[in-house]
Image: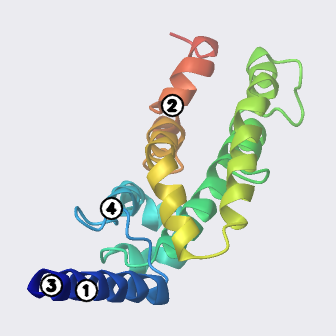
Amino acid sequence: MKKALIAAGLVVLLAAVGTGVFLARQDPTGMAVGDGGAQRALWDAMAPHGEQFLNAYGDQLAAPPDDPMLALSAFNELAYSITGRGGLWRKMLPTQYFGCGANQADPICGAFREAEPAMAGWDKLQARIADLPDERAARAFLRQNGAVLQEYIRTFVPRDRSLTAVQATPFFRDRFGRYLPQ
């Protein structure tokens, strides 16, 4: 009888905990180690670029993130200003820095056209981020894609908008470095 009461109490306790997690609509995965790890890493990777590319998030980047939707929204703004259609790599560099609007025949302008698919792939990822319905989906997305988003920042995002900073990015060195005088 005593064992039956203990077992029944244990079942009731487990049911209460499960119901609490369900009603709180939280994703329990990662709670043991803190489910903000990928979110925090992304936030930390974006923080140095706040002044240059994320003015709207400047105040928020100073504090640890508590909202995965906010972190992904900030990433989307960063990605739009870097590889988006009107961003640094697709508009500013080709037209303002290399004169591709007037001189399409220049080899570096051809390299920008060839790099278009690499940048367009990020448009698709940004659309996926924009379609995330809630925080739970955002946390799951960050766990699955956090490393990719951080690699994006390391590869494409210069410390500022100067040509020197852009030339220091891995993407520029790999794709365009051969077109510059040595």
The amino acid sitting under disc 3 is Ile
Q: Which residue is mark 1?
A: 8
The amino acid sitting under disc 1 is Ala
Q: Give the foreground label among 2 and 3.
A: 3
Which of 46/33 is in front?
Answer: 33
The amino acid sitting under disc 4 is Gly
Q: Which residue is mark 3?
A: 6
Name which residue lies at 69% across and 40% down.
Answer: 93
Residue 72 visible in this rendered orientation of the protein: yes
Q: Position of residue 72 (x, y in %)?
A: 55, 65
Q: Which residue is mark 4?
A: 30
Disc 1 vs disc 3: Cβ atoms closer than 8 Å? yes
Name which residue lies at 89% across and 25% down.
Answer: 104
Mark found first going from the N terminus, 2 or 3:
3
Q: CA gap, disc 4 to disc 3?
A: 30 Å
Q: Could you say whether the residue bearing mark 4 is in a helix, strand or loop?
A: loop
Q: CA gap, disc 2 to disc 3?
A: 68 Å
Disc number at residue 167?
2
Q: Could you say whether the residue bearing mark 3 is in a helix, strand or loop?
A: helix
